[in-house]
Image (spheres, rainbow, N blue to C red):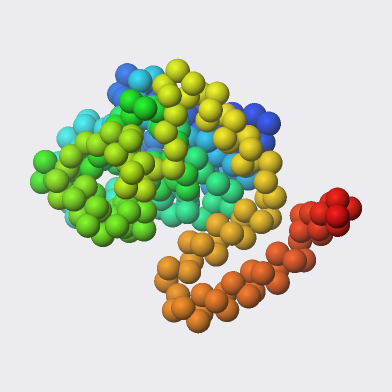
Amino acid sequence: MRPFQNILYQVDRGIARVTLNRPDKRNALNAETIAELSDAIANSSHLILMSGAGADFCSGADLSGLQKMFDAGVLDHVASARALADLFLTMRRHPRPIIAAVRGRALAGGCGLATAADIILATDSAKFGYPEVNIGFVPALVMAILRRSVSEKRAFELIAGGDVISAQQALEIGMINRVFPDDAFDSEVDGYAFRLAEKSASAITLSKHLLYHIDSMAFETAIEAGVEVNAIARMTDDYKQGIEKFLKKH
């Protein structure tokens, strides 16, 4: 894995801690940060805990980068969009869970980055939103993921209204998983991540792969895919060891 300039990467007790490290820019996403995130995630075999240095998780796209792209051609814009899309796909394809630990603001592309994670944990004071419409832009890359996280009408309201919502509101609409008090956030997140990291790696990998593929399947095809995964799971070492432990207790 190459040295990183815009993120921090550290493995601690089976958890890969990936930290956006541009606090002076509110961890805004530029091309280099997106490339480093993709590299770190693609080359990690651990559960990933993603967070932002400083007060905010991620404020969205780097304004200086947007200025540079102002007069770019369509192929440059496609390449830029493709890089972020590839990051989201890399996150979705990663074999282990990816947790976004959101403190402060997660806005625009930063909200998209959090939404692309498998699990979102947030502080009481965290804020989420897709304000792109306010500058005539569209949160197009995250729409497929957001639509799978909340209802169609909630998704449309978030996208068309461009409003920033609280962590509690995000929890109520199913956009995030848990909200923790600000002063206990780090310990609560660590406890959650360590408990999840202790689960069977093979079972989690098979479950994540199946869950994210059944949306594109017809019902009967999804059931058949479940049959295959069920059979494969029974052949794993984790399953055999788990059954042995269960039988010994009973």
Where the C terminus falls, by quadrant?
bottom right
Please tell me in which quadrant of the rendered image residue 147 appears: bottom left
| Residue 205 position (above or below residue 162) | below
Q: Residue furthest front?
A: 250
Q: Nearer the viewer, residue 162 or 29?
A: 162
| Residue 184 position (above or below residue 94) | above
Q: How many marks?
A: 0
Q: Residue furthest right?
A: 248
Q: Position of residue 46 (x, y in %)?
A: 62, 42
Q: Image check: 79 left or right of 102?
A: left
Evaluate whether residue 195 shows in this view. yes
Q: Nearer the viewer, residue 184 or 99?
A: 184
Q: Nearer the viewer, residue 86 or 180?
A: 180
Q: Position of residue 191 (x, y in %)?
A: 59, 30
Q: Nearer the viewer, residue 75 or 193?
A: 193
Q: Position of residue 131 (x, y in %)?
A: 18, 40
| Residue 75 position (above or below residue 69) | below
- The residue at the point 47 percent across, 24 percent down is 185
Q: Image check: 210 left or right of 145?
A: right
Where the N terminus falls, by quadrant?
top right
Q: Image check: 72 left or right of 8?
A: left
Q: Position of residue 189 (x, y in %)?
A: 52, 30
Evaluate whether residue 38 shows in this view. no
- The residue at the point 33 percent across, 44 percent down is 172
- The residue at the point 36 percent across, 53 percent down is 149
Q: Image check: 64 left or right of 103?
A: left
- The residue at the point 29 percent across, 57 percent down is 151
